[in-house]
Image: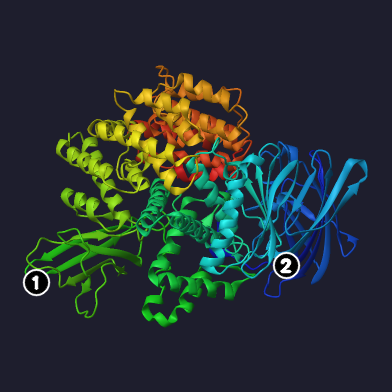
């Protein structure tokens, strides 16, 4: 395997100013003529040799300034020696879209041609310096059979279209913006659209379109609304305007990822476009909004300013995730009736994001694929579209906002665009703009130490110790940090960690925070800047003669760290009830739950702790709180997060202990759960027609959680679930009822009914497959081993390994999200894993590599399981013709 290193970066030897493409689309042989205006890069000292990338292309001919030339074509490279300083290169090549199962480059989905060029797909369309720092102006002529592919779309503006002989037609698209090749896109398909014009804040008008298959026009409205909200939000929050005359979203059913931000022509997995109350759940609606926002926000953070090289991926991804998270929060707040509900809604969104970080990124950062948000090396770049680059990357941006303040952060963003619009830049350029725009803040704006977050991998453990002097009212908090060494970084350095803190007095209210030596007004919440391995902070003027104030540390999860607190159970319960920071109220509850789960896993009965926890949960359920908050507060930590808090993982034991606790909670809260279930049902019915707004989604969420708890115990839970399933008027309630029944192993009739109802709705069938692959029990309650049930799903007539959504819904879901059965004692889960990694690898290496990663943490499992997991990994590694994608993952896992 070839390793690419960040420090080996060289400027491109040749630049491309203009690209004219003529693409004659044909499923068996698409002909691409490319006319490139090329010139020597004055900044390069490399030899005068033109090297272009090209993969899976059939070379037909090439001319240089009109003269035929003969390139050397080998190892996915096109090389021409002794080229002039400035010239026009024409190449003609062919490719076969119908055979392209990788879904990278030009491929076919059921109703047409689509492209995916990020990261390195453009080289599968034509010979080109396929790297993000080569930015060119593109004009594209598309032609195709008119009856089959009546819609021809490209980046930018439509200049011309017309008929051609032989039943074909053509369209010419021109993109006025310079762009890297990874943002190129085309679509030729049988599609229809919902469209609308919008006037931007400066009075420009633009046409917005959402293109879908015929028959899906009843599911585009939410995406369109989300797009409009995204445009408005970026104008208001960051002063960024839509720069195009036309902005298109196209839905495709075969797609490797969520969506892609191609300039003016976003291509989306149908899963993140199509939604209506009958087929989409509240979570789907929220996901559509967030992905539409994410791709739209890339238009500035990613497209107008792009990455110099792929090591800088977090420059656009971390920043854009941060932006989409903030967008969703602001949308929730905007819909809230008052400030309290707005604050709670924002906290719930933050909690969801932190749960994702803990369940996906923390394990990644502790395993064989651990890398800094700006990686130093990779073998296959597609393996680095990770939770670290995205989600931890977003946390690194968020911390800059915490350090500089919201206004300071905005000044930094303005400076970033002022400096770099139209350029391909680095993460360091971003931080430098933040610093420069805030220089007047003095030391606060010095991010030199902060930059280590970009270069150092691993999750820091932050420890806090307290010393209380009750006579003088002085509290000293000593913070220390430690990051475990990793293979590539044996020595880890201290980071700049912003720790947002509050102190609760005996009545639960926030106390003024005055650091030793300070005078003047004292805030009740502030940021402590931990910059060394260990630092003490002394607060003075606290109520003397009282018990030690209870610290609320890392409010709002102000840094992506593991907090090793020294809080006693009573203090956690106190925070859970009184902390003015809703995130930390939730967090205190999670820590209580974790300590009960840990005790049980150690074989202790933890009776007292459990009853304290159940009581605290009962109070939360009975309190007059935002239902969405109550839902997250009553949800036990995920199995994946629990596993990360343990040294040795026994996955089925974790699931068992978590189930037991769930049943105890359900038993303890049974009457309240049923009462709440009923009351919420009444309130929702009174509110009328289904709407996916945060308030009603929150009510449904809590009501369905109550139902889940009730189906965990003997009683009328199953009966309620059956009734709810039958009476449901929307997918959220119907699917929640089905889920509750399936986990209880009592869903035979409903699963059959569900399949029949939604046989023609691919995204709903994906849910049906996912639910069955991730269920706690075989959904019909039979005693067959779970893996046989999964095998049955894989053989189902509606299963199709080539469709990524369907493949994910069974095999990836089973291996990644059903730990108790994946880790079955006999190793059958691992065998299935190996077989499907190999099968998928010959079709679609990107999806195979994702699946391969479900073995990342194999060294943490019990010795017997480790042995079986290693065997399965070895079986995959032993295959000689593995893709670079899977080779890198299994190589690192075994390494
Ligand atoms: N930028 C794309 C991801 C491309 C993944 C390539 N393997 C979607 C996004 O992050 O918005
Ligand atoms: Zn992105």
- Report whether 822 appears left or right of 835: left
Between tags 1 and 2, which lies in front?
1
Disc 2 crowd, CA 10 A, few/some/many (<14, 14-19, 20+): many
**Residue carrying label 1:** 472
Q: How is the image coloured?
A: rainbow
Question: Measuring 56% from the left and 39% from the top, which residue is drawn there?
Answer: 848
- From the viewer's perspective, is residue 869 above or below residue 70? above
Tag 1 secondary structure = loop
Give the quarter of the image for residue 192.
top right
Residue 179 horizontal/vertical position (percent): 68, 63
Whether the residue under disc 2 has CB within 8 Å of ligand 1: no
Question: In this rendering, would 653 be left or right of 141?
Answer: left
Pick the residue in front: 34 or 755. Answer: 755
- Residue 880 visible in this rendered orientation of the protein: no
- How packed mark 1 is, by other alpha carbons closer than 10 Å (few <14, some 14-19, many 20 or more), is few
Contact flag, marks 1 and 2 (Cβ < 8 Å): no
Rendered location of residue 175, percent (x, y): 74, 62
Residue 652, position as x, y percentages in the image: 34, 31
- Among numbered discs 1 and 2, the one appearing first in the sequence: 2
Q: Secondary structure at mark 2?
A: strand
Q: Is residue 251 left or right of residue 340?
A: right
Q: Residue at label 2?
A: 14
Instruction: Look at the image and tell me in which quarter the C terminus lies.
Output: top left
From the top left corner, tell me how far across and down residue 36 is, in percent. 80, 62
- The residue drawn where x is 44% and y is 81% is 439
């Amino acid at each position: 395997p070839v390793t690419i290193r960040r420090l080996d970066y060289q400027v491109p030897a040749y630049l491309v100013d203009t690209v004219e493409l003529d693409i004659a689309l044909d499923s068996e042989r698409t002909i691409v003529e490319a006319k490139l205006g090329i010139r020597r890069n004055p900044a390069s000292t490399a030899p005068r040799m033109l090297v272009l990338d090209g993969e899976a292309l059939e070379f037909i001919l090439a001319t240089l300034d009109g003269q035929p030339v003969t390139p050397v074509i080998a190892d996915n490279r096109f090389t021409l020696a002794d080229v002039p300083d400035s010239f026009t290169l024409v190449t003609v090549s062919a490719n076969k879209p119908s055979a392209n199962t990788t879904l990278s480059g030009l491929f076919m989905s059921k109703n047409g041609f689509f492209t995916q060029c990020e990261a390195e797909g453009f080289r599968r369309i034509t010979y080109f310096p396929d790297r993000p720092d080569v930015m060119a102006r593109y004009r594209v002529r598309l032609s195709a059979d008119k009856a089959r592919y009546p819609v021809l779309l490209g980046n930018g503006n439509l200049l011309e279209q017309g008929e051609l002989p032989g039943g074909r037609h053509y369209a010419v698209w021109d993109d006025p913006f310079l762009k890297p090749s990874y943002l190129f896109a085309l679509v030729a398909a049988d599609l229809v659209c919902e469209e609308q014009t919008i006037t931007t804040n400066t009075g420009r008008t633009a046409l917005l379109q959402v293109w879908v298959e015929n028959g899906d026009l009843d599911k585009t409205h939410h995406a369109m609304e989300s797009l409009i909200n995204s445009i408005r939000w970026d104008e208001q929050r960051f002063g960024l305007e839509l720069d195009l005359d036309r902005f298109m979203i196209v839905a495709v059913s075969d797609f490797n990822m969520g969506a892609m931000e191609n300039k003016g022509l976003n291509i989306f997995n149908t899963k993140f476009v199509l939604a209506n109350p009958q087929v989409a759940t509240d979570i789907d609606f929220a996901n559509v909004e967030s992905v539409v926002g994410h791709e739209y926000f890339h238009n500035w953070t990613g497209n107008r300013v792009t990455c110099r090289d792929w090591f800088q991926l977090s420059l656009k991804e971390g920043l854009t995730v941060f932006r989409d998270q903030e967008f969703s929060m602001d949308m929730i707040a905007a819909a809230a009736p008052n400030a309290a509900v707005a604050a709670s809604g924002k906290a719930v969104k933050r909690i969801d994001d932190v749960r994702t970080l803990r369940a996906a990124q923390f394990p990644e950062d502790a395993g064989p694929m651990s890398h800094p948000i700006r990686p130093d090396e990779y073998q296959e770049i597609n393996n680095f579209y990770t939770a670290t680059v995205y989600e931890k990357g977003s946390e690194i941006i968020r911390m800059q906002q915490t350090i500089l303040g919201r206004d300071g952060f905005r000044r930094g963003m303005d400076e970033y665009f002022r400096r770099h619009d139209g350029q391909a830049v680095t993460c360091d350029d971003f931080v430098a703009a933040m610093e420069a725009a805030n220089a007047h803040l003095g030391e606060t704006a010095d991010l030199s130490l902060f930059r280590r977050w970009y270069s150092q991998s691993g999750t820091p453990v932050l420890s806090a110790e307290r010393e209380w002097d009750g006579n003088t009212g002085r509290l000293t908090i000593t913070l220390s940090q430690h990051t475990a060494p990793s293979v590539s970084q044996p020595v880890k350095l201290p980071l700049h960690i912003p720790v947002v803190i509050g102190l609760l007095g005996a009545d639960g209210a926030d106390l003024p925070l005055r650091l030793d030596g300070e005078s003047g007004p004292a805030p009740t919440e502030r940021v402590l800047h931990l910059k060394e391995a260990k630092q003490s902070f002394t607060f003075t003027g606290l109520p003397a003669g009282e018990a030690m104030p209870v610290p609320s540390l890392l409010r709002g999860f102000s840094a992506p760290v593991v907090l090793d607190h020294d809080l006693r159970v009573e203090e956690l319960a106190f925070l859970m009830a009184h902390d003015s920071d809703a995130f930390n109220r939730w967090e205190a509850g999670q820590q209580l739950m974790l300590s009960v789960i840990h005790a049980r896993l150690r074989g202790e009965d933890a009776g007292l702790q459990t009853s304290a926890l159940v009581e605290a949960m009962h109070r939360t359920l009975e309190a007059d709180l935002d239902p969405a908050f109550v839902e997250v507060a009553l949800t036990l930590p995920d199995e994946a997060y629990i596993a990360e808090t343990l040294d040795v993982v026994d996955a089925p034991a974790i699931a068992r202990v978590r189930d037991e606790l769930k049943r105890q909670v359900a038993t303890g809260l049974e009457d309240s759960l049923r009462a709440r279930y009923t009351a919420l049902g009444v309130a929702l019915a009174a509110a009328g027609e289904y709407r996916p707004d945060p308030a009603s989604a929150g009510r449904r969420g809590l009501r369905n959680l109550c139902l889940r708890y009730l189906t965990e115990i003997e009683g009328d839970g199953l009966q309620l679930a059956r009734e709810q399933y039958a009476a449901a008027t929307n997918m959220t309630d119907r699917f929640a009822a089905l889920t509750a029944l399936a986990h209880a192993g009592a869903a035979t009739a409903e699963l059959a009914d569900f399949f029949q109802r939604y046989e023609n709705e691919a995204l709903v069938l994906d849910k049906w497959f996912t639910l069955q692959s991730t269920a706690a029990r075989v959904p019909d309650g039979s005693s067959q081993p779970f893996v046989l049930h999964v095998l049955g799903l894989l053989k189902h007539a509606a299963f199709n390994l080539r469709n990524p959504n369907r493949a994910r819904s069974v095999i990836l879901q089973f291996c990644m999200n059903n730990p108790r059965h994946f880790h079955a004692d006999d190793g059958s889960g691992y065998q299935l894993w190996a077989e499907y990694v190999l099968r998928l690898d010959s079709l679609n290496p990107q999806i195979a590599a994702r699946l391969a990663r479900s073995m990342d943490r194999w060294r943490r499992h019990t010795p017997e399981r480790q042995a079986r997991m290693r065997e399965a990994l070895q079986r995959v590694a032993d295959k000689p013709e593995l893709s670079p994608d899977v080779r890198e993952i299994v190589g690192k896992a075994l390494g």
